[in-house]
Amino acid sequence: MLNWKICELNTECSNTNKRAGGSQPGSDWRDDLARRVSAMTSLRRDEPLAGRTTMRVGGPAELLAEPASEADLAAILRFCAERGIPKFFLGRGSNLLVRDGGIRGVVVSLIHPEFARIVVEGARLRCGAGARLKNVAHEARRQNLTGLEFMEGIPGSVGGALRMNAGAMGSWTFDVVESIRVMSDEGVARDLTAAEVPVEYRSCPLLKAQIALSAVFIATGGERTGIDARMKSFSLKRWSSQPAAPSAGCVFKNPEAVPAGKLIDELGLKGACVGGARVSLEHGNFIVNEGNATARDVLELIELLRARVRAERGIELETEVEIVGE
Ligand code: EPU
């Protein structure tokens, strides 16, 4: 599946020139980009994204690129910079709400095996941005390394977890980062120590502009029984307090005063719905897709929750989930 360059051309030519990139009449910037990368890199036009997000809503990517090497990724980023084509970095889509009109420009996904490796070196795990956090946690467990158990239940990729400094069970991703490798818009890769990367609760501002390629996580030697016990208790806590239905994880950042889920619960808003989107009965900070939700339903429900919390408690809820597209 990965060693082909261009998917079926299912676009209507009359549409393409109005899109990103300002191509010449009769040409399509996506053809130009295809000439810049190797045949191993996958480029898919008008690729539906709903199935690539855990919320399962939203429109297509104008072009979905899955680079097969750092060189191809650099070529894509340089092309976007040259042509002024917008780009968006897609992880495992677990903290993402794509609007129904989809995403213009290039959506870059580091899902190719080249970017999903996990290499253990003593107590360090060198992990590609496309690796699943669950796999990182299990690899550490296999090596009797402790400290990464909290990643087990976070349904995202290393790249996404770095970008939003994802956390669970009292730990943040950057608690266990020794260094990261990033690439700039000019396609230049560099390594940074954790101390060189400012982070906040649920945010790593540097990675809004640059793409994370990999990270080195640092663990410590541990006992398998203790690791298993921690993983089990985290998993139990998660399954007993969070919904299994499709969602994008927590919708809002926790305000200082009170956790967002508790706030929404106290206001009796669990179960509130717009179309196919419903506030989870299990946890007030989750919106679940009941099967037929649109991004518009989810966004309307988010606004409804924010308005009620503002009116009744005077608190301004800030979304944690990343909202993108048109
Ligand atoms: N609570 C309620 N009602 C609810 C939900 C929660 O009263 O409907 C109460 C709980 O009983 C608890 C408090 O609110 O006393 C906090 O709830 P919880 O322990 O579930 O943690 P949280 O603050 O809601 C955070 C992260 C989660 C992470 C969990 C577990 C944020 C925004 N959320 O949730 O992360 O999984 O802790 O560690 O920081 C995510 O980032 O997408 C996410 C789900």
Image: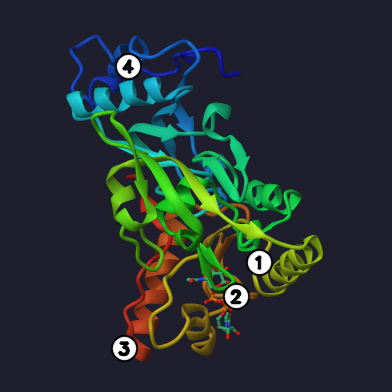
Which residue in the protein does label 3 denote?
314
Residue type pointed to by label 1: Pro
Q: Say which of 187 and 181 sits in front.
A: 181
Give SS at disc 2. loop
Give SS at disc 1. loop
Whole-Å distance between the Cαs marked 4 and 3? 49 Å
The reply to whether dot 1 and dot 3 touch (C-beta < 8 Å) is no
Residue 123 in picture, x, y percent from top left: 61, 51
Nearest to N terminus: mark 2 or mark 1: 1
Which residue in the protein does label 1 denote?
243
Q: Can residue 96 be seen in this view?
A: no
Residue 265 in picture, x, y percent from top left: 54, 84
126 shown above or below 252? above
Residue 39 in picture, x, y percent from top left: 47, 10
Q: In which quarter of the image is the N terminus?
A: top right
Q: Which colour scheme is used?
A: rainbow
Left or right? Give the position of 108 relative to 282. Answer: left
* Label ID, residue 283: 2
Which residue in the protein does label 4 denote?
33
Residue in the image at 56% along x and 59% along y: 276
Q: Can residue 158 be seen in this view?
A: yes
Quadrant housing residue 75? top left
Whole-Å distance between the Cαs marked 2 and 1? 7 Å
Residue in the image at 33% along x and 13% along y: 36
Residue type pointed to by label 3: Gly
